[in-house]
Image (spheres, grey):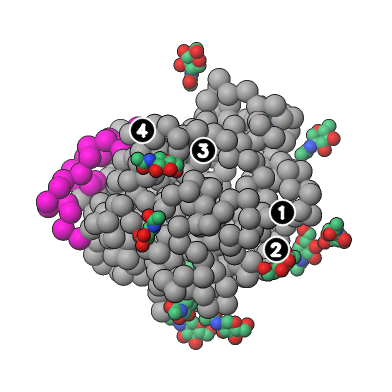
Amino acid sequence: MRTSHVGMALLAASGSAYAQLGLPMQIGPLHFSESCQKSIFEVFTSGSFASCFRTADLLPLITSPNASIVPVLDNFMTDICGPSDVCSNATLYNASQVILSGCSGDLKNESLSDSVVTTAFGLYPLVRDVLCLKTMNPYTNMSYGGFLGNPPIPVTSSVYNSTNGTFCVTSLLTQLSAYFNHNITVSWIEAALMGKNSTAVQLVKEINPNILCNECIFGAVDLVVEAFPAIANISVVNVTMKLDPNITLNIPQNATLVSLMDKECAYKNYTVTMNGTLPWNITESAQNRTMLNSTLPMGMMNMSMPLNITSPMTMSMPMGMSTSSGSAMPSMTSSA
Ligand SMILES: *[C@@H]1O[C@H](CO)[C@@H](O)[C@H](O)[C@H]1NC(C)=O
Ligand SMILES: *[C@@H]1O[C@H](CO)[C@@H](O)[C@H](O)[C@H]1NC(C)=O
Ligand SMILES: *[C@@H]1O[C@H](CO)[C@@H](O)[C@H](O)[C@H]1NC(C)=O
Ligand SMILES: *[C@@H]1O[C@H](CO)[C@@H](O)[C@H](O)[C@H]1NC(C)=O
Ligand SMILES: *[C@@H]1O[C@H](CO)[C@@H](O)[C@H](O)[C@H]1NC(C)=O
Ligand SMILES: *[C@@H]1O[C@H](CO)[C@@H](O)[C@H](O)[C@H]1NC(C)=O
Ligand SMILES: *[C@@H]1O[C@H](CO)[C@@H](O)[C@H](O)[C@H]1NC(C)=O
Ligand SMILES: *[C@@H]1O[C@H](CO)[C@@H](O)[C@H](O)[C@H]1NC(C)=O
Ligand SMILES: *[C@@H]1O[C@H](CO)[C@@H](O)[C@H](O)[C@H]1NC(C)=O
Ligand SMILES: *[C@@H]1O[C@H](CO)[C@@H](O)[C@H](O)[C@H]1NC(C)=O
Ligand SMILES: *[C@@H]1O[C@H](CO)[C@@H](O)[C@H](O)[C@H]1NC(C)=O
Ligand SMILES: *[C@@H]1O[C@H](CO)[C@@H](O)[C@H](O)[C@H]1NC(C)=O
């Protein structure tokens, strides 16, 4: 089921896929009616949202499942970070209305409110800002004392955008590809998520929590916490309890994501800022930035709702790999 999140986003990038393939009837815990599937496809394959969010750039993820996803994403980010590719409020609003009109019955069946959809589109400025972070200190085979070795594609490759730094997503995925000693491809991710590649599963479990101690991750968290300051006060134990009551974490009840990151990474002297100030060597490359919709934080803080709904969007986030396998995230902190 997990892979159908990925599959969904991938299919959505393909123009005529709906007619040819149809859609999975179930995505994660959600069942989608035909009218809902149609409206999602419409938004992601045609119209102004598809052109400003450049979903067509992601097509190679479907057509070449055995090629590295990193050059595809790097190209996608180059396109969405420029000045001419900003989605306007009107575009985001219209896209959410198309989906709401096709999916209203589905949302009702799942007892979800319309704000789930408007929130998802309202997060666009934050998602774009996070994707457009660049680092002047990207992963190389000399990082971490050369411990992880050579990645399959070095960040210095000419396929990557190197104007004023390397995209953080590219740097982090390059680091992961060195750790896994394999190109990060759609096939590889699917095998790992489905548990079909036990070597990969084992390596995921053994990821050192200090992978979080990276300027790029701190930069992303800085932006998220600036947008939603309440996140800094949410207990990690409370959230994991909600996700899976069986998980026991060896951390204080009042520990927050921010306090854990600061503690884990004290040896690197990193701290999460609350004001959007980015770490040294990290810059925001997004041009013509837009503001988060001011009505968002209320919906965002209803933890049971966005945790389910925004998870499919994490395919764009480097850490999405660990959140989608349920127990990988807690194990990263509990083994600290
Ligand atoms: C990694 O992916 C790139 C691009 O898809 C490809 O050119 C390269 O040969 C791959 N490397 C390995 C070791 O598979
Ligand atoms: C690299 O990305 C920036 C925006 O982040 C863009 O202005 C520039 O043209 C891109 N360079 C190349 C070679 O694509
Ligand atoms: C982007 O911002 C620049 C200056 O801040 C402005 O001149 C330009 O018109 C903007 N472009 C778009 C597409 O809004
Ligand atoms: C910034 O990046 C440069 C180049 O990789 C590196 O030498 C330097 O240590 C970094 N600065 C900090 C504060 O991490
Ligand atoms: C790169 O950085 C320089 C100096 O900070 C700046 O003038 C230029 O606009 C930047 N280029 C892009 C594409 O952001
Ligand atoms: C499984 O994952 C490991 C670790 O990334 C990799 O070395 C191996 O090639 C993968 N196996 C297959 C069949 O893709
Ligand atoms: C965690 O949950 C408990 C009980 O539900 C609550 O009293 C406490 O305020 C929560 N703590 C945080 C930091 O959210
Ligand atoms: C928690 O563990 C019990 C007993 O092992 C199991 O029956 C239950 O399904 C688990 N709950 C979750 C949410 O995984
Ligand atoms: C948790 O509570 C302890 C004891 O009350 C306190 O010293 C600590 O600073 C708190 N941690 C956080 C992250 O609030
Ligand atoms: C850690 O950062 C603080 C403030 O940014 C600075 O004053 C201090 O010297 C740094 N410590 C080390 C060991 O780099
Ligand atoms: C942002 O917060 C950091 C501490 O988290 C502080 O050092 C910095 O001066 C603040 N910057 C601004 C512009 O307020
Ligand atoms: C878009 O919406 C946000 C929040 O509602 C608002 O702050 C911003 O001014 C709007 N931008 C435009 C161009 O209308």
Residue type pointed to by label 1: Val
Does residue 262 belong to the magenta stretch? no
Q: Secondary structure at mark 2?
A: loop
Query: CA separation, marks 1 and 4?
Result: 36 Å
User: Within 8 Å of ligand 4, the CB of disc 2?
Assistant: yes
Query: Which residue does the image show at 37% across and 51% down from the upper left?
Result: 185
x and y percentages locating residue 277 in the rendered image: 70, 64
Question: Mark 3 and 4 residues: CB-CB less than 8 Å, in contact?
Answer: no
Q: Nearer the viewer, mark 2 or mark 1?
A: 2
Query: CA separation, marks 3 and 1?
Result: 25 Å
Which is nearer the eye, 81 or 334? Answer: 334
User: Within 8 Å of ligand 6, the CB of disc 4?
Assistant: no
Q: Nearer the viewer, mark 4 or mark 2?
A: 4
Q: Looking at the image, is mark 1 or mark 4 earlier in the sequence? A: 4
Query: Which residue does the image show at 45% across and 35% down from the upper left?
Result: 199
User: Within 8 Å of ligand 11, the CB of disc 1?
Assistant: yes
Assess disc 2: are there few (<14), some (14-19) or many (≥20) residues with their C-alpha within 10 Å of its C-alpha.
many
Which mark is on residue 279?
A: 2
Query: CA separation, marks 2 and 3?
Result: 27 Å
Q: Secondary structure at mark 4?
A: loop
x and y percentages locating residue 206 in the rendered image: 57, 35
In screen coordinates, is 212 left or right of 159? right
Highlighted range, magenta: 15-37
Residue type pointed to by label 4: Lys
